[in-house]
Amino acid sequence: MADTDDIRDGKSFGLDTPASTEGFYLKGLNNNDWGLKNRLSRIFNKKSGNTVMLAFDHGFLMGPTSGLERIDLNIAPLAEEADCLMGTRGMLRTSIPPTCSKPVCLRTDTGTTILTQMNDNVLIDEVEAININASAMAAMLSVGEKETEAITIANFSRLVDIGNKYGIPVMGVTAVGKDMARDARYFGMASRVCAENGASIVKTYYTEGFEKVVASCPVPVVIAGGKKLPELEALELCYNAIQCGAAGVDMGRNVFQSEAPLAMMKAVKSVVHDGLKPAEAFEFFESLSK
Ligand code: 5RP
């Protein structure tokens, strides 16, 4: 029989360090509260430390873009393969079954479309994020855009205030001004501005010198896929980003516009979680899509 002192210090369980005091596994996020960490650990795979988020929030800016005409038919069947679903409240409520237990990153800013390209956004009510049971909230920062930089950074900061109040992590979605080069200098700056304003996750674009973007951002960075590429190139993009230290992808068009979206989801996961090389992942994609 263990005596009471042994039980108190955990010796009778063979524990030197109680699990509750171990370091958290996501970069820069160890000093946050339990709720925020718990939500993040639903999004990021504990083994690889990475995530494959499935982005289908494009419609609020672009309307029914190719592959997103019917989210119930095109996206819902992919949901089980994703580590996290990134969408708007409208599409989640209408087209994703509430029985889906995947964590949600709720797109929380709105206000303009690609027709005006103003990015002059406002935030939806935070009660919506709680109601939807969001594991994260996302909003865009338009860094370097004269008319809208200030409003998007102020929105973002307010969203982080709200997120911190309820333990909901906030993802910064970087956009750089029309006149700014889409390179490591500006994506690095935009990513850092997100982190400085309290982002728990930053979404940006892969570019040459991406390791510098990651190194100067103290929280996990995930990449957007951007416009549809041939599958092998999209897998190379994922591989290169992971090699440079990205913590995963938040990918849309390169998955849902693929000829075989489910196979592409699985191939992307094989790169992000299992470290497959692009050629191996492409072979995997082809074998699955046959
Ligand atoms: C749209 C977004 C998308 O979520 C983001 O661009 C990822 O999608 P894709 O891989 O298709 O670029 O923020 O506003």
Image: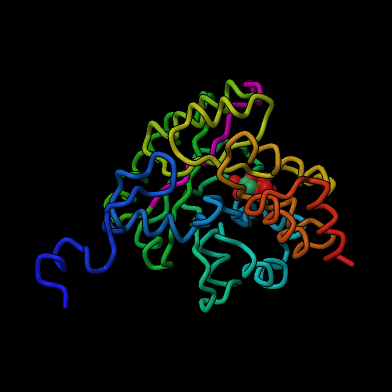
Residue 64 spot, x, y in % from top left:
71, 58
Q: Is residue 165 above or below residue 189?
A: below
Q: Is residue 224 above or below residue 85?
A: above
Residue 144 spot, x, y in % from top left:
53, 24
Residue 156 spot, x, y in % from top left:
41, 40
| Residue 70 is a magenta residue | no
The quarter holding residue 125 reads: bottom left
Identify the residue shown where x is 44% and y is 57%: 41
Residue 97 visible (yes or no): yes
Q: Nearer the viewer, residue 221 or 14?
A: 14
Residue 196 spot, x, y in % from top left:
38, 31
The quarter holding residue 77 reads: bottom right
Quick one: quadrant of the C terminus? bottom right
**50 with respect to 217 (left or right):** right
Q: Nearer the viewer, residue 225 or 1?
A: 1
State the residue lying farthest toward the left: 4
The quarter holding residue 70 reads: bottom right
Residue 61 visible (yes or no): no
Quick one: quadrant of the N terminus? bottom left
State the residue lying farthest toward the front: 1
**9 with respect to 77 (left or right):** left
The colour style of the image is: rainbow
**150 with respect to 3 (left or right):** right
Identify the residue shown where x is 73% and y is 51%: 253
Q: Write the start and end of the magenta stretch as one range.
A: 169-182
Q: Is residue 148 above or below residue 81?
A: above
Identify the residue shown where x is 69% and y is 44%: 225
Identify the residue shown where x is 85% and y is 60%: 259
